[in-house]
Amino acid sequence: MPKVVDHGERRRELAGAVWRVITRDGVANVSMRTVAAESGWSSGALRHYFATRDELLAFACQQVLARVTARITALNPQGTPNEVVRALLLETMPIDAERHIEASITFAFLALGLGDPQLAAIQREILVGMSELCLNLITHLLPAESPRRQVSLARRLNAVVDGLSVHVLAGHLTPAEAVSELDAHLADLPT
């Protein structure tokens, strides 16, 4: 009887190998060969699932987006509106090892998306998703503000979260410092 292979699970395993290569060696060192070596697979077996490096990278980035989205969707934070917004935003920031890896991968795709239409489409999906999350959170936090003002505040919130995340990834801020700055920003929002 032939062995039943879960192709979706195999693809997710390979995405994990991509994440490890990016985290350890940087996105420039992701190749079919390095991912095959990291996963313990042959390059030929890897090509059965992904024909190109870009296809592999795109899938790995989509998996990060799916993980973060699932985590946020499953979260049921309690507390004040500010505490709820804070809890949801922290799921997107590099404040622990898992989220540091996810943010590293997400931000690595900024540069890659500039030169590759397939990767650019995934990067837009991530950017639009974060933008929509921030707008939903601002709308929840400040329902009395005009829609135009909500959009403006959501863009600022998005910029703050992205900026703090980049500074943590670059080692300019610790995760605790970034959380403190996020708290300060949320406290400064109009009530």
Image (cartoon, helix red, strand yellow):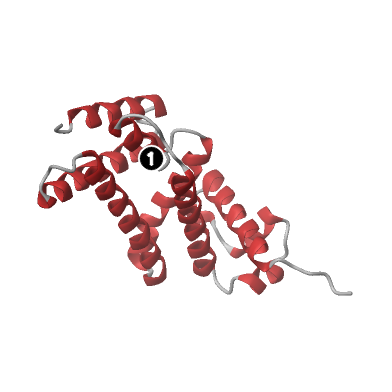
Quadrant (top left/top right/bottom left/bottom right) for the C terminus: top left
- Residue 51 is left or right of residue 164, and the answer is right
Image spot of residue 163 (x, y percent):
29, 40
The residue at the point 28 percent across, 44 percent down is 137
- Label 1 SS: helix
Relative to 124, residue 48 above or below: below
Pointer 1: residues within 10 angstroms few (<14), some, or many (20+)? some
- Residue 83 is left or right of residue 76, and the answer is left
Specify the amino acid type for callout 1. Leu
The residue at the point 43 percent across, 37 percent down is 94
The residue pinned by badge 1 equals 88
Image spot of residue 49 (x, y percent):
63, 71
For residue 167, say whether it is visible: no
- Residue 122 is left or right of residue 74, and the answer is left
The residue at the point 63 percent across, 62 percent down is 33
Is 78 in front, or is 150? 78
Image spot of residue 106 (x, y percent):
42, 51
Image spot of residue 125 (x, y percent):
36, 61
Q: Quadrant of residue 45?
A: bottom right
Tally of numbered tags: 1
Relative to 168, residue 126 above or below: below
For residue 49, say whether it is visible: yes
The residue at the point 40 percent across, 43 percent down is 92
Quadrant (top left/top right/bottom left/bottom right) for the N terminus: bottom right
Q: Quadrant of residue 162?
A: top left
